[in-house]
Image (cartoon, rainbow, N blue to C red):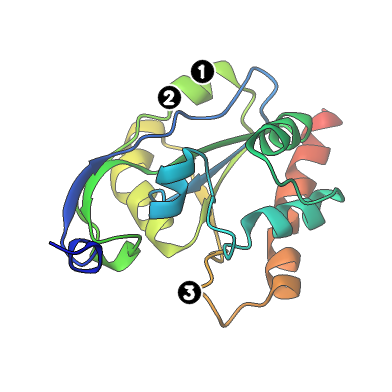
């Protein structure tokens, strides 16, 4: 079977990336499920065309991190926890629209450890999964932000940055408490 044929077949995949958080995390950003590229590099938003790192760096007024070590340092410095709404699912490639049989991640370990003030979902799929599976466990409302995926072509980087500013505002206001 060629690799191009293989990519069009649904696969049952367990999330390969550990959550990123510490005791100082103030916000939690949840994606849906890692893309093929993110699964390969074993860290969030690994595809170079995903605008997440560019947007979040602009929001927090920093340089866009390149390496995984730089990304982890950036998240830690800005009190950001990260994970995804989905623990495992059947998916075709990186397509959120192909996700079936989703099993949610248990985010309670992050909530117990960090000082999470707000949960943000990167895009509609993450938000829908959160509302359906995770909200009933936590009772914490999440904020849906526009997806940073290149598939969300209706939103350019400037528009995304403006919408995502709420993340930095939340961290800053929590530091004043």
**25 relative to 43, above or below:** above
- At x 39%, y 44%, the residue is 85
Residue 35 visible (yes or no): no
- At x 29%, y 68%, the residue is 97
Return the residue at label 1.
112
**At which x and y percent is residue 135?**
38, 41
**139 relative to 128, above or below:** above
Drawn side of residue 36 relative to residue 102, left or right:
right
Residue 68 visible (yes or no): yes
Return the residue at label 2.
108
The N terminus appears in which quarter of the rendering?
bottom left
- At x 79%, y 48%, the residue is 169
**At which x and y percent is residue 14?**
26, 37
Residues marked 1 and 2 touching at CB (< 8 Å): yes
In what element is the residue under mark 3?
A: loop
Return the residue at label 3.
151
């Amino acid at each position: 079977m060629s690799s191009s044929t293989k990519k069009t077949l649904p696969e049952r995949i367990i999330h390969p990336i550990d959550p990123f958080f510490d005791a100082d995390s103030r916000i939690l950003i949840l994606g849906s499920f890692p893309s093929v590229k993110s699964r390969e590099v074993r860290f969030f938003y690994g595809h170079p065309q995903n605008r997440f790192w560019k947007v979040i760096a602009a929001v927090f007024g920093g340089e866009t991190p390149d390496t995984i070590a730089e990304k982890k340092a950036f998240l830690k410095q800005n009190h950001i926890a990260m994970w995804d709404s989905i623990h495992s699912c059947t998916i075709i490639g990186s397509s959120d629209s192909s996700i079936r049989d989703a099993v949610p991640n248990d985010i309670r370990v992050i909530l117990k450890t960090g000082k999470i003030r707000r949960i943000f979902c990167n895009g509609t799929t993450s938000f829908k999964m959160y509302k359906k599976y995770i909200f009933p466990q936590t009772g914490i409302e999440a904020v849906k932000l526009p997806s940073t995926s290149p598939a969300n072509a209706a939103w350019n980087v400037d528009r995304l940055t403006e919408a995502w500013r709420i993340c930095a505002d939340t961290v800053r206001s929590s530091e004043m408490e």
